[in-house]
């Protein structure tokens, strides 16, 4: 067997690196109302609050270290670069720090995006409410993260990888945010075996063939070493 392995990761992957998830008890969306923080309307209304939220997350992510799960996924991708596609919803950059090359469908905290000319540049640690674009000068710099109501990035490429995959794996994601939550059904339609790796069962566990329950830092390295020794 030598088919593609598409791995979708979510906030649970970085939980043991000290970064909070969104929907677990005490998660970010219990502390903030997502409509006040993670929508284009919120940014238009109150850019200072939105920038402050992402500045804090950027600083936290910059200090965080990849855990054993990020490292195992990097090792897997390096072992089979033509087979392993990592798709992440995480904006924290920890997969890259571990040496992996993920597709960022929800953007990256360390990038800034101009709301006027679409120019991208490395985000300063502290973005201001009216962050100037270095290209066009408009005071319209925003974090290059995908907000609710916006289209995730690279969906066409991701769709092609999913249609072509032998195994689809979801790690540390609650399966509540579309379109990522629908990837598993699409992979099944195209004949993939589907694996869910999560701390606990999710609302979408029923759509997966195989389940591995437990903390990612233990379950992911174990799964990676199994498939490396089995060949899939
Ligand atoms: N190991 C494995 N899984 C874990 C761990 C852990 N140590 N800790 C938590 N989890 C699991 C939880 O059980 C939950 O299913 O991670 C999942 C986290 O779910 P969410 O907080 O909903 O995060 P995610 O699925 O990545 O959210 C998707 O929502 O707000 C948006 O844009 C944001 O990309 C994010 C998207």
Image (cartoon, rainbow, N blue to C red):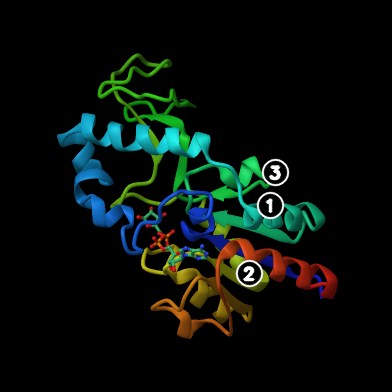
- Disc 2 to disc 3, C-alpha distance: 19 Å
Pointer 3 with pointer 1, Cβ within 8 A: yes
Judged by depth in the image, the label closer to the viewer, 2 or 3, is 2
Is 139 rendered above or below residue 98? above
- Disc 3 to disc 1, C-alpha distance: 7 Å
Q: Could you tell whether 227 is left or right of 22 in the image?
A: right
Residue sitting nearer the eye, 46 or 152 = 46
Ligand 1 picture quarter = bottom left
Q: Quadrant of residue 85?
A: bottom right
Q: Quadrant of the N terminus?
A: bottom right
Q: Which mark is residue 219?
A: 2
**Residue shown at 35% from the left, 24% from the top:** 127
User: Mark 1 = which residue?
Assistant: 71
Sequence-first disc among 2 and 3: 3
Residue 25 position within the rendered picture, expressed as x and y whole percent measured from the top left: 32, 64
Q: Which mark is residue 97?
A: none
Can residue 26 be seen here? The reply is yes
Q: Could you tell whether 135 is left or right of 26 in the image?
A: right
Disc 2: residue Cβ within 8 A of ligand 1's nearest atom: yes
At mark 1, the secondary structure is helix
Residue 189 position within the rendered picture, expressed as x and y whole percent measured from the top left: 55, 81
At mark 3, the secondary structure is loop
User: Mark 3 = which residue?
Assistant: 99
Residue 228 position within the rendered picture, expressed as x and y whole percent measured from the top left: 81, 67
Q: Residues within 10 Å of mark 3 (few under 14, many from 20)?
A: some
């Amino acid at each position: 067997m030598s088919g593609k392995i598409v791995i979708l990761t979510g906030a649970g992957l970085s939980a043991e690196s000290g970064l909070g998830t969104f929907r677990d008890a005490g998660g970010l969306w219990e502390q903030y109302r997502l409509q006040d923080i993670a929508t284009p309307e919120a940014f238009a209304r109150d850019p200072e609050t939105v920038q402050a939220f992402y500045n804090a997350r950027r600083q936290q992510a910059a200090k965080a270290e990849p855990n054993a799960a990020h490292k195992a996924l990097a090792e897997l991708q390096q072992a089979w670069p033509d087979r392993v596609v990592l798709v992440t919803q995480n904006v924290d950059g920890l997969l890259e720090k571990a040496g992996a090359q993920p597709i960022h469908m929800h953007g990256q905290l360390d990038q800034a995006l101009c709301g006027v000319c679409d120019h991208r540049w490395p985000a300063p640690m502290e973005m201001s409410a009216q962050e100037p674009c270095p290209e066009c000068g408009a005071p319209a710099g925003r974090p290059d993260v995908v907000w609710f109501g916006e289209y995730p990035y690279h969906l066409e490429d991701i769709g092609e990888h999913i249609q072509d995959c032998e195994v689809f794996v979801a790690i540390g994601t609650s399966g509540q945010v579309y379109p990522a939550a629908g990837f598993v059904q699409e992979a099944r339609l195209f004949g993939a075996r589907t694996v869910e790796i999560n701390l606990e069962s999710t609302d979408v566990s029923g759509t997966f063939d195989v389940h591995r329950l437990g903390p990612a830092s233990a379950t992911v390295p174990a799964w990676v070493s199994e498939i490396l020794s089995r060949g899939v």
